[in-house]
């Protein structure tokens, strides 16, 4: 949590680690995953076809997933496909950086940067992205099942609104954007490889709480490094955490990867 703005940090819903800007990939970068489901769509009468049509639509619910989780589960023979996604992500970041630096400038400004080459590179790499499931390479529409479509966290905008308890190094849970670079997962592979995301998205779409989840307003994930810092800070740090729990209804959760390392 950012002590100045009270922003919650974005964490990977699968592993519980903080997500944030990284120099190298996979780093702490990642995606937001949306279910794509078949839905009965009303058809206007002027189209002169049946009154409804079954079409795939993107559900508004989403959950975060880091690149590290994807890499750990991805078969070796599909790593090259993931590398294409990384290259597209880097090209998109380079283009967005130029756009951001040019904001508010005239093209005659000597500091104005030409973005045409960066845009051309992005389009080229975007066209190389896998249209099928990242894991198995099969059509995600097979058997008319739902599938999952993920978009990367847009690094340039999202890096302007960082969060964190002691240092602002994480993406903010409430103030980030997604970009164009994307990944698709078929129903079975997403279910098998990312069970926490799969299950929680199901509950989210039904508008229900998972049986093992208690209703809380906020969750704050702490890494072992942060826990050690709290111990060093002594009473003042403990007072801050107690205030968060009592006054802001925050639940302190040790990051999953650090459990048992105390």
Image (cartoon, rainbow, N blue to C red):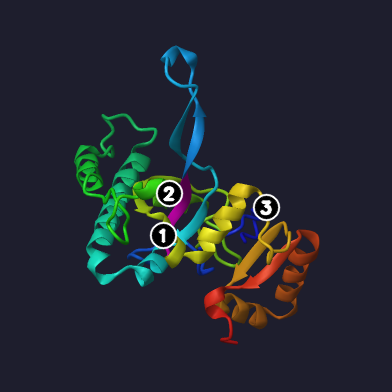
Q: Alpha-carbon distance for marks 3 and 2? A: 22 Å
Q: Position of residue 39 (x, y in %)?
A: 50, 37
Which of 135 and 220 lies nearest the eye of the viewer? 135
Location of mark 2 (residue):
145
For the N terminus, which image quadrant? bottom right
For marks 1 and 3, give the one nearer the viewer.
1
Quadrant of the image containing the C terminus: bottom right
| Of the image marks 1 and 3, the number of the one nearer the N terminus | 1
| Alpha carbons under labels 2 and 1: distance apart | 9 Å
Magenta includes 7? no
Q: Secondary structure at mark 1?
A: helix
Q: Look at the image and give the residue range highlighted in magenta.
A: 28-36
**Left or right of residue 190, residue 164 in this image:** right
Percent position (x, y) of residue 120? 20, 40
Where is residue 148 shown, x and y percent of the image?
A: 43, 51
Look at the numbered discs 3 and 2 and tell me whether their residues touch, using CB distance below 8 Å: no
Regarding mark 3 in the picture, which secondary structure is present there?
loop
Label 2 sits on a secondary structure element that is loop
Answer left or right for 240 relative to 258. Answer: right
The residue pinned by badge 1 equals: 188
| Residue 20 in view in this figure | no
Left or right position of 26 against 107: right
What is the magenta segment's predominant secondary structure? strand
Residue located beneath label 3 in the image: 208
For the residues labelled 2 and 1, say whether their Cβ atoms are less than 8 Å apart: yes
Where 254 falls versus 127 (above or below)?
A: below
Mark with earlier residue (2, 1): 2
> Which of pointers 3 and 2 lies earlier in the amino acid sequence?
2
């Amino acid at each position: 949590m950012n002590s100045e703005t009270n922003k919650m940090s974005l964490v990977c819903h699968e592993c519980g680690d903080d997500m944030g800007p990284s120099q190298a990939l996979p780093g702490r970068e990642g995606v937001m995953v949306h279910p794509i489901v078949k839905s009965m769509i009303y058809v206007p009468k002027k189209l002169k076809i049946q009154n409804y049509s079954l079409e795939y639509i993107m559900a508004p619910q989403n959950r975060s997933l880091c690149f590290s989780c994807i890499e750990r589960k991805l078969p070796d023979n599909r790593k090259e496909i993931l590398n294409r996604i990384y290259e597209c992500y880097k090209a998109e970041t380079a283009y967005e950086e130029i756009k951001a630096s040019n904001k508010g400038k005239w093209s005659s400004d000597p500091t104005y940067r030409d973005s045409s080459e960066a845009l051309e590179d992005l389009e080229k790499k975007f066209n190389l992205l896998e249209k099928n499931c990242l894991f198995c390479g099969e059509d995600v529409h097979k058997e008319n099942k739902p599938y999952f479509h993920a978009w990367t966290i847009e690094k340039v905008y999202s890096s302007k609104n960082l969060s964190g308890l002691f240092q602002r190094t994480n993406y903010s849970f409430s103030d980030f954007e997604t970009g164009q670079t994307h990944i698709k997962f078929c129903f079975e592979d997403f279910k098998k490889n990312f069970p926490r995301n799969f299950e929680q998205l199901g509950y989210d779409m039904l508008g229900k709480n998972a049986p093992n989840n208690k209703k809380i307003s906020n969750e704050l994930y702490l890494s072992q490094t942060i826990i050690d810092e709290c111990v060093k800070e002594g009473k003042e740090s403990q007072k801050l955490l107690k205030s968060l729990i009592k006054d802001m209804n925050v639940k302190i959760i040790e990051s999953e990867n650090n459990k048992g390392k105390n």
